[in-house]
Image: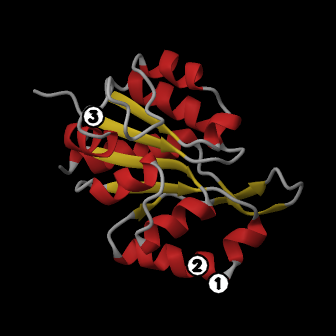
Amino acid sequence: MKRPEVLVGVSGGIAAFKAAALVSQLVQADLGVHVVLTESAAKFVGEATFAALSGRPVARQDFDARQFPLGGHIMLAEQADLLCVAPATANFLAKAAHGLADDLLSTLYLEFAGPVLVAPAMSCQMWERPAVQRNVRQLVDDGVQMVGPEEGWLSCRKRGLGRMAAPDAIRAAILQRLSSL
């Protein structure tokens, strides 16, 4: 039986450090994991961390002739059973909801035909904005599964709804979704 393959997209927010724990947990659950790191995410957690945890090169650019001669969005989408974006920033949610493809992760989201889970993470003020809530509703209508956000202490030094779900909760949602495929 083929080992399930998961794409973990990491967008740029302070919660990116939790994505490292998620990748480790997925690998320990015997899943193949490819990490797609946005430019802004790399400012929070380095590429070497995700490469070491996943045991695979990290994808950052769509048109890397050596790693992805057909384009990363195409080659990664063909190999994967599930796409999880954690953290999913307000910026990523907006791109996905409106079909904007200006980096590898947003292009991959549009190319990928399988199940998608996103774990939103942002300040409580951002999460509550009508525009963000419209984007979330659009994504849910499009079939995207939301995992979180949770209430708790945020990097903006406030308590509120906007904290990325715990890696355990995201892993459980991924395993449950994979078991139904």
The image shows residue 101 at horizontal and vertical percentages of 43, 60
Q: Quadrant of residue 19?
A: top right
Q: CA distance from mark 2 to mark 1?
A: 5 Å
Q: Amino acid at mark 1?
A: Pro
At horizontal 43% and vertical 32% (from top left) the residue drawn is 59
Label 2 environment density (alpha carbons within 10 Å; few <14, some 14–19, many ≥20): some
Quadrant location of residue 124?
A: bottom right
Residue found 36% across the figure and 78% down from its top:
141
Residue beneath disc 3: 5
Q: Are marks 2 and 1 in contact (CB under 8 Å)?
A: yes
Location of mark 2 (residue): 133
| Residue type pointed to by label 2 | Gln
Q: Indicate the position of residue 61 as horizontal and vertical percent values.
A: 45, 37
Question: On screen, 155 above or below 92?
Answer: above
The numbered mark at residue 130 is 1
Instruction: Say left or right for 177 vs 55.
Output: left
Q: Is 61 in front, or is 84?
A: 61
Helix, strand or loop for disc 2: helix
Q: Is residue 89 left or right of residue 142?
A: right
Q: Secondary structure at mark 1?
A: helix
Is tag 1's residue or tag 3's residue first in the polypeptide sequence?
A: 3
In this view, the residue in front, 175 or 131, is 131
Q: Is residue 26 above or below residue 121?
A: above
Which badge, 2 or 3, comes first in the chain's sequence?
Answer: 3
x then y, percent, for residue 17: 66, 35
Cα distance in 3D space between marks 2 and 3: 30 Å
